[in-house]
Image (tube, rainbow, N blue to C red):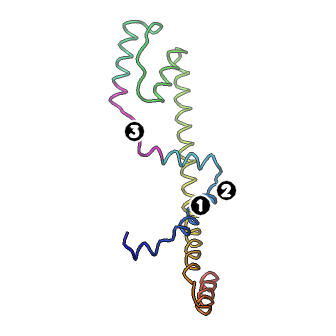
Amino acid sequence: MSNSFASLFDPSAFGVVICGTLLATLARCGWRDLTVAITMVASLGRQGFDEQANRVAIARTIRKVERDGPLCADPPPPPDTEMRKLFDIYFRKRCLETLRHTHKAARVQREIRRVQAARAFETAGELAPIFGLVGTLYAITGLAGGEEGVVAATMASLATAVLS
């Protein structure tokens, strides 16, 4: 950062904006939605669904089931967590209806998590400009640290700006 730009950055005002937005979002959405949103942001960098690796795992499973039978087959688990759960359910219960029900419930749960995260980000987007203004006013009050007349004039201008 250049020296002139660094002098314009006020870490305490930035903290007011970030903390205020997070606290207000927490108050409006609750812990669960905010935690889901943060978890989803953290998972953005992770590798997604590996189709090829899961296809290989399914092919190996089919070969083992054909060779050893469904009761004796002990296939290697697929790399995807949700698919691994589905395999476990199928080999424990041996019921396609239970498998379908579990898959549908997992899909519904993923959609609920998406809605929760979207609601939290939507709320934060609504509240951030408000706390941006609060942070700006906080930073401006720190600039007026000199003569008594300058401080009074700055405060009067701030009061007029906020009121209007």
According to the picture, the residue beneath numbered tag 1 turns out to be 19
* Residue 73 left/right relative to 128: left
Distance from Cα at disc 1 to Cα at disc 3: 31 Å
Q: What residue type is labelled 2?
A: Ala
Q: Position of residue 162 (x, y in %)?
A: 62, 81
Q: Earlier in the sequence, mark 2 or mark 1?
A: 1
Q: Which amino acid does label 1 sit on?
A: Cys
According to the picture, the residue beneath numbered tag 3 turns out to be 48
Quadrant where the N terminus sits is bottom left
Q: Where is residue 16 in the image (x, y as percent from the top left)?
A: 58, 66
* Residue 136 left/right relative to 57: right
Distance from Cα at disc 3 to Cα at disc 2: 32 Å
Magenta-tinted stretch: 42-55
Q: Residue lying farthest bottom?
A: 149
Decide whether residue 151 is among the magenta residues.
Answer: no
Q: Which of marks 3 and 2 is nearer the N terminus?
A: 2
Q: Which of marks 1 and 3 is nearer the N terminus?
A: 1
* Residue 96 left/right relative to 149: left
157, above or below 119, in the image: below
Q: Within the image, what quadrant is residue 66 found in?
A: top left
Element carrying mark 2: helix
